[in-house]
């Protein structure tokens, strides 16, 4: 289950519309509900993310962690690109 501290950190990292971004990532990566084979609804993702009534779902929680790793990789790529641009601009 996602802790209160993690939840607040995730919201800060992901930013506004965090549930919509997570939902879009799930669709992009094909993360679906096991039994029905359908995509998770934003409402269900939100309930797991916010631990509504103690709700937990290992697939969604794992997907959220994957999304955070994905964001970290994107930020690292952007930082490297910016560094290359600065380097080339100074030459």
Image (cartoon, rainbow, N blue to C red):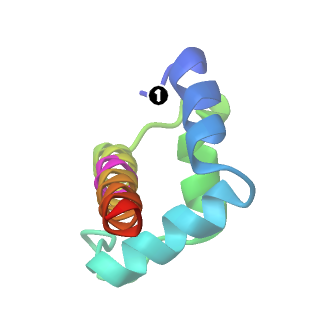
Q: Which region is colored magenta?
A: 69-73
Please give left or right for residue 42 compared with residue 37 in the image: right
Residue at 28 percent of width and 54 percent of height: 73
* 29 or 16: nearer the viewer: 16
SS state under label 1: loop
Q: Quadrant of residue 36?
A: bottom left
Q: Is residue 69 visible?
A: yes
Residue at 50 percent of width and 76 percent of height: 24
Q: Residue furthest front?
A: 91
Reply above or below: 67 against 41.
above
Reply above or below: 14 against 33.
above
Please give left or right for residue 33 compared with residue 19 in the image: left
Q: Is residue 36 visible?
A: no
Reply above or below: 79 against 26.
above
Q: Quadrant of the N terminus?
A: top left
Please give left or right for residue 29 compared with residue 24 in the image: left
Q: Which residue is denoted by mark 1 in the rendering? A: 2
């Amino acid at each position: 289950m996602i802790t209160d501290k993690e939840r607040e950190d995730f919201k800060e990292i992901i930013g506004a519309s965090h549930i919509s971004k997570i939902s879009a990532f799930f669709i992009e990566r094909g993360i679906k509900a096991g039994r029905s084979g359908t995509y998770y609804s934003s409402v269900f993702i939100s309930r797991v993310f916010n631990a509504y009534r103690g709700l937990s779902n290992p697939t969604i929680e794992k997907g959220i962690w994957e999304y955070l790793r994905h964001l970290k990789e994107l930020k690292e790529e952007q930082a490297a690109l910016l560094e290359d641009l600065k380097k080339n601009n100074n030459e």
